[in-house]
Image: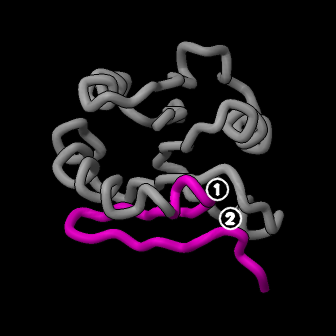
Amino acid sequence: MTFFLDINIPLSFANFLEGEGHKTIIGAKSGFHGSTDWEICEHAIKNKSVIVTHDLDFGELLAVSGSSKPSVIIFRIQPLTVENIKESFSQIIKETKNELNEGAIVVIEKSSYRLRKLPIRK
């Protein structure tokens, strides 16, 4: 799986993902400072990647747009450290892989996660 790491995700998380066999695109190192959330979404769609963020705006944008892609993983963990992230990440990815490939928002909290399939319709 390919993950686009938003600028608010620790850069060292890319090392963990790559160690797990995933590809990463690091927003902070790929010229995305100042890009809109929609520009990042378009890039993720084009590159078939899942956005990993700490920002709720991506979920709201996808809900309003009615889009079925890209998938987004939103961390709601404090403090947002690599140790706290990777505790549950690998298992959650295994459990939600099919939905992420089809289009979904996954919100990861300290001891649980929520999944919402895309598109979200009112």
- Locate residue 4, reporting x and y percent: 54, 33
Q: How many marks?
A: 2
Residue 27 lies, with reference to residue 60, above or below; the image says above
The magenta segment is 99-122
Q: Is residue 54 magenta?
A: no
Gap between marks 1 and 2 measured at Cα: 5 Å
Give neighbour class at mark 1: few <14, some 14-19, many 20+ (Cα, 10 Å): few
- Locate residue 84, reporting x and y percent: 20, 47
Extreme residue toward the front, this view: 98
Give neighbour class at mark 2: few <14, some 14-19, many 20+ (Cα, 10 Å): few
- Locate residue 77, reporting x and y percent: 30, 56
Using the image as rendered, state which of residue 95 and residue 53 is in the foreground: 95
The answer to whether mark 1 and mark 2 are in CB contact below 8 A is yes
Where is residue 50, by image quadrant?
top right
- Residue labelled with disc 2: 60
* Amino acid found under the numbered disc labelled 2: Glu
Q: Secondary structure at mark 2?
A: helix
- Locate residue 57, reporting x and y percent: 64, 56
Q: Residue at x 20, y 68 (%)?
A: 111
Q: Residue at x 61, y 59 (%)?
A: 102
- Residue labelled with disc 1: 57
On screen, residue 74 versus residue 47, left or right, reads left
